[in-house]
Image (cartoon, grey):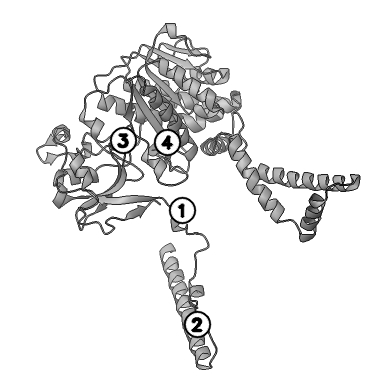
């Protein structure tokens, strides 16, 4: 019944639009015949019926990504083709070596799911679902406190607005008082009251438009709501990030893991699901005792009185270990930097964590602009350290060391984020939820010699297929530090590269080896692209 009604309303709007256009044309012809002078503006702009529920943004607000095409010399990487599984029917391009993101829903361990169910039932909280949803949305929209410079610039803008809104009498009175060489006591009092009134209005307006940062209350109630709303998304995100290390560096077997800001222990479960036999020590650092208590309760399958944990050798501490205790194979800092409001304390923490890293350093945060800025802050800090020593290398997601191309798209940085499908609890309206996140993985020392280190990564959206013309469109972040929306043709670039591009998704690597000569020809060799030497707006 919904489809016929929708079609009926569309036809009704079109009939009204034609009727209004006919009336305008008739009025225009009648007035012109009577000798009235009409303005030169278009009289038919008002006949356009706008959708009140969809406001169109101006072109200047959308960043533009350059649209290019691969030249005919660019083919699939032969090393990547050797790793594509092959059966009697041919290559299985769905499992090409560049696939880093799971196409299926990430499975939650049954032990973890049962432990959470026991804890939620024993809590007796009837509003846990609604409270968890509120906390989920609040954490997603959380930001850092604004800096002093931004507050001063906002106050100056508000000062000009407040003074411009003054009446003419008030403006002339202030000018007369300021022009006088000496003021009486009453005039000084009047001028002071006016200044205080303006300052009060500025403070009130500044309070309305400023984000007010508040530290999170890590109490028992918060730990329960956090475990309900964030345990599964955190587990899925960390499993996706760590699985890339296992795929691209299969010889790596971690022996110890340190998790800064461990919370309810999602990193322990994610690491144990990938390396269940090699990790001998899990060192969890969190200064909130209630969060550590909840993490231990989950590891004990909801039974606080149980002695042994499901995952052995897990230790909880409230401070970082000393450097004498040695380094850890993997250091994880997930959704923690937002709890450090000052930049100096964040950079000091990053330096201490990097000193305790032996192989891989993993940072994860929310997929918002604020989370992306935190990741870029860490990236800039560690790359400065790499100028003195050659031990800092970016493993993922960046295929390049230069400045992030996302920062060059617009005045405000466009977040480089990715998406993972997370399962939902039974009984909720949806069976899955899309969780967006930003992350970066550093490798101390040289990267493992692998062809994936030089492959571009698909960012922003999944690949768009144009089947009638047999070409695909995808946005790539290339090893040379460039960002572009590329056309991959089946006829020009080969069936193998076209099929692998069509089977790739947001966050995967594209098995193609780009040469310097090929990159110089991107702008000039475009066949199927209808926007050659132009750009594509980022929606």
Question: Which quadrant holds residue 466?
Answer: bottom left
Question: Which residue is the site of mark 4?
Answer: 437
Q: Nearer the viewer, mark 2 or mark 3?
A: 2
Q: Give the quarter of the figure containing the N terminus.
A: bottom left
Q: Residues within 10 Å of mark 1 (few under 14, many from 20)?
A: few
Residue that carries the numbered disc 1 in the rendered image? 61
Q: Position of residue 48 (x, y in %)?
A: 48, 72
* Residue picked out by circle 2: 24
In the rendered structure, the answer to whether residue 516 lies left or right of residue 307 reads left
Q: How far apart are the alpha carbons under marks 2 and 4?
A: 51 Å
Label 3 near label 2: C-beta < 8 Å? no
Which tag, 2 or 3, sits closer to the chain's start?
2
| Residue 4 at x, y percent in the picture | 41, 67
> Please, is residue 9 above or below residue 317 in the view?
below
Asked if one can make out residue 425 in the rendered structure from this viewpoint, the answer is: no
539 and 16: which is toward the camera: 539
CA distance for labels 3 and 4: 15 Å
Label placed on residue 102: 3
For marks 2 and 4, the one nearer the N-term is: 2
């Amino acid at each position: 019944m919904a489809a016929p009604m929708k079609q009926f309303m569309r036809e009704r709007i079109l009939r009204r639009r034609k009727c209004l256009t006919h009336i305008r044309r008739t009025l225009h012809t009648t007035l012109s015949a009577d000798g009235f002078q009409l303005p030169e503006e278009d009289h038919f702009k008002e006949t356009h019926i706008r959708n009140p529920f969809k406001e169109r943004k101006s072109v200047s607000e959308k960043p533009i990504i350059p649209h290019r095409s691969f030249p005919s010399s660019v083919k699939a990487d032969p090393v990547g083709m050797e790793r594509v599984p092959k059966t009697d029917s041919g290559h299985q391009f769905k499992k090409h070596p560049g696939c880093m993101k799971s196409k299926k829903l990430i499975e939650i361990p049954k032990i973890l799911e049962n432990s959470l169910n026991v804890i939620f039932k024993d809590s007796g909280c009837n509003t846990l679902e609604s409270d968890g949803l509120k906390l989920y949305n609040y954490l997603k929209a959380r930001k850092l406190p604004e800096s002093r410079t931004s507050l001063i610039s906002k106050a100056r803008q508000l000062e000009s607005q407040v003074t411009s809104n003054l009446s003419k009498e008030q403006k002339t009175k202030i000018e007369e008082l300021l022009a006088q060489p000496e003021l009486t006591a009453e005039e000084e009092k009047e001028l002071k009251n006016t200044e205080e009134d303006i300052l009060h209005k500025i403070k009130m307006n500044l309070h309305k438009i400023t984000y007010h940062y508040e530290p999170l209350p890590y109490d028992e109630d918060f730990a329960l709501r956090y475990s309900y709303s964030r345990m599964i998304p955190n587990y899925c995100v960390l499993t996706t990030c760590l699985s890339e290390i296992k795929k691209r560096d299969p010889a790596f077997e971690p022996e110890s893991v340190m998790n800064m800001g461990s919370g309810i222990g999602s990193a322990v479960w994610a690491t144990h699901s990938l390396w269940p036999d090699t990790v001998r020590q899990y060192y969890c650092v969190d200064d909130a005792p209630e969060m550590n208590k909840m993490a231990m309760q989950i590891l004990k399958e909801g039974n606080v009185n149980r002695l042994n944990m499901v995952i052995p050798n897990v230790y909880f501490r409230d401070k970082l270990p000393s450097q004498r205790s040695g380094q850890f194979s993997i250091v994880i800092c997930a959704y923690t930097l937002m709890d450090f409001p000052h930049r100096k304390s964040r950079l000091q923490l990053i330096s201490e964590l990097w000193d305790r890293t032996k192989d891989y350093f993993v940072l994860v945060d929310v997929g918002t602009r604020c989370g992306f800025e935190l990741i870029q802050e860490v990236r800039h800090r560690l790359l400065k350290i790499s100028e003195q020593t050659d031990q800092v290398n970016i493993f993922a997601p960046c295929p390049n060391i230069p400045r992030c191309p996302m920062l060059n798209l617009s005045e405000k940085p466009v977040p480089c984020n990715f998406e993972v499908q997370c399962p939902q609890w039974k009984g909720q309206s949806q069976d899955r939820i899309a969780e967006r996140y930003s992350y970066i993985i550093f490798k101390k020392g040289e990267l493992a010699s692998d062809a994936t280190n030089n492959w571009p990564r698909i960012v922003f959206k999944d690949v768009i297929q144009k089947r009638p013309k047999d070409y695909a469109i995808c946005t790539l972040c290339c090893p040379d530090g460039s960002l572009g929306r590329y056309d991959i043709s089946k006829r020009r670039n080969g069936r193998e590269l076209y099929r692998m591009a069509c089977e790739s998704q947001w966050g995967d690597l594209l098995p193609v080896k780009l040469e310097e000569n090929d990159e110089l020809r991107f702008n000039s060799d475009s066949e199927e692209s209808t926007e050659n030497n132009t750009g594509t707006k980022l929606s």
